[in-house]
Amino acid sequence: MTNFTRPKTDTAMFNRADFPTDFTFGAATAAYQIEGAQFGGAGPSHWDTFAATPGNVVRAEDGARACDHYHRWAGDLDLLKEGGFDAYRFSTSWARVMPDGVTINPDGLDFYDRLVDGILARGLAPYLTLYHWDLPAALADKGGWVNRDTVLRFADFAETVMDRIGERVSRTATINEPWCVSWLSHFEGHHAPGLRDIRATARAMHHIQLAHGMAVTRLRDAGHDRLGIVLNFADIQPVAAGQEAAAARADALANAWFIQSIAQGTYPQEALDGLAPHMPEYWQDDMPVIATPIDWLGVNYYTRELVSAQPDAAWPAIQSHDGPLPKTQMGWEIHADGLRGLLTRMARDYVGDLPMIVTENGMAWDDHIVADGVYDTERISYISGHLAAARAAMEAGVNLQGFFYWSLLDNFEWAFGYEKRFGIVHVDFETLERTPKASFHAFKACLRPNDG
Ligand code: IFM
C-alpha cells in the first residue's frame, strides 16, 4: 500500500464519562448478512431468490455462507466482549425459525436460544430484532408484504420467537427499517422482491406498519415488554431554495410515514396524495393497531439527502442530488449533525421523552489492509463525529439511551454483495478469518480504558 500513513489505533473517539453510566454501547448485525442461510434446516428466503436472479446483486453474490456466523457465533461474541461493548444487536431469521413461514424448525429456535445464552454468558445485553428482511420464500410466493395475510403470519412468528427467548432479551424491535422493506423493495426495486409497482408499494407500506402494530399487540398480550421498532431516517433537505415542497414530499415518504403512523395514528398527507388510490380497502381501520404504544424507538442514521422536484416525472416526481460533503464507500455524504437534528426532531414532534436508541450508525470504507492490521482512520472519525452529535442531542434534552455501531463484521451488504465493508472487524471472505480493525481497537480504548 503506497501513500499510507499508519494511524494510531487507540485514537480516543469519545470519552465514556461524557455519557450516563447506564448508556449502552453496542454493535449490530443481521441474520441474513452474517449467519449463512444454508445451515440448520433454514428454508429459502426471498433474498435467496432475489440474489439468484442475474443483475440484482453485485457479482451475483448471496448470503448462502456469508460470515458463517451460524458456526462461528461464539468467537464473534468473544470479540464483542473483548471490545468492551455492553450489548449486541442481532436479528432472528424467519426462514430459519419457520422454513415455510409457518412450521417451526426446532433447530432454528435452538440456535437463537444458544445465541442468547452465549450473549448473556459474556455479560452482554441481547437486543433482538425479529425481522431484518429474510421473508420465507413460501410467503413471498403468496405475495409477501403485499398480501395482508403475511401480517398475521408475522405476528405468529414474533410470538413463537418471543415465547422462547423474549424473557432473556433486553429490548425487542419488531421490524428493521420498514422503509427498506416497502419503498426500496417495491417502488425502487433495489431489494427483494425487486418490484417497481406503486400499488404493491402502497400495500407493503401499510402492511409492514400493521405487522409491527399487530406484533406489539400480540406480544404485549402474551406478557412481553420492552418492545419497539427500528426506523431508518435520512436528513432530507431541499437542494436549493424553492424545492421545499419536493423535500416535504420526500420526507413524508421516507421518514414521516413510518413514525407519524406509530406516534399519531395517521399517515402524512403529502404521501397519501400519491398512495391513497392504491391503498388496501379499509386501511383507516388499522391505524389504531399501528399506533399501539411502544416502549422505545430505534433510530438508524447514516446520511443526508438533497432533493428537488423532477419536472415531467410521475408522482412523487423527486430526484436526489450529489452533495458537496465527503462521502463514504456507499457514496453517502458524511453529515453527523443530521443525527442531532433527527433525534431532536423525533423527540419534539413525535415521541417526547420515550427512550431512543441509535440502533445503527456506521460507514462503509475501503480499509487499508497491511501486514500488521487493518486501518480505518476515516471510520474512527465518522464514529467520533456521530457520537458527538448524539451527545449534543442529549444535551438538548433527548432521552437517548444507547448507540450501536453498524456493523460488528464486514458482511453481505444486500444488493452490493460483499463489496462494501461496514465492519469494525474485517472478514476475509475466502478464509473467513476475522481481524479487528483500528476502529475496533479505538472503541476498546474508550470502552475499556483500563484494559491496557
Ligand atoms: O447493511 C444495512 C442494514 O442491513 C440495514 N441498515 C443499513 C445498513 C447499511 O446499508
Image (tube, rainbow, N blue to C red):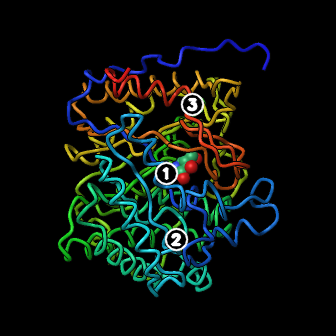
In-image side of 375 versus 248 (left or right): right
- The residue carrying mark 3 is 437
Give the vertical position of 448 relative to 232 (above or below). above
Crowding near pointer 2: few (<14 within 10 Å), some, many (20+)?
many
Asked which quadrant contains residue 366, the reply is top right
Identify the residue at horizontal 35%, vertical 28% (top origin). 447
Residue type at mark 3 is Lys
Nearer the observer: mark 1 or 2; the answer is: 1
Residue 239 image offset from top left, x and y in percent: 60, 32
> In front here: 66 or 133?
66
- Disc 2 on helix, strand or loop? helix
Residue 15 image offset from top left, x and y in percent: 32, 20
Identify the residue at horizontal 43%, vertical 21% (top origin). 13
Residue type at mark 1 is Thr
Residue 92 image offset from top left, x and y in percent: 44, 65
Quadrant position of the N terminus in the picture = top right
- The residue carrying mark 2 is 204
Question: Which badge, 2 or 3, comes first in the chain's sequence?
Answer: 2
In-image side of 200 versus 387 (left or right): right
Give the vertical position of 54 relative to 309 (above or below). below
Nearer the observer: mark 2 or 3; the answer is: 3
> In front here: 57 or 443?
443
Question: Which badge, 1 or 2, comes first in the chain's sequence?
Answer: 1
Calculate the distance from the C-alpha at mark 2 to the C-alpha at mark 3. 38 Å
Residue type at mark 2 is Ala
Give the vertical position of 126 relative to 440 (above or below). below
Q: Which mark is residue 29?
A: 1
Crowding near pointer 3: few (<14 within 10 Å), some, many (20+)?
many
- Disc 3 on helix, strand or loop? loop
Asked which quadrant contains residue 355, the reply is top left
Calculate the distance from the C-alpha at mark 1 to the C-alpha at mark 3. 16 Å
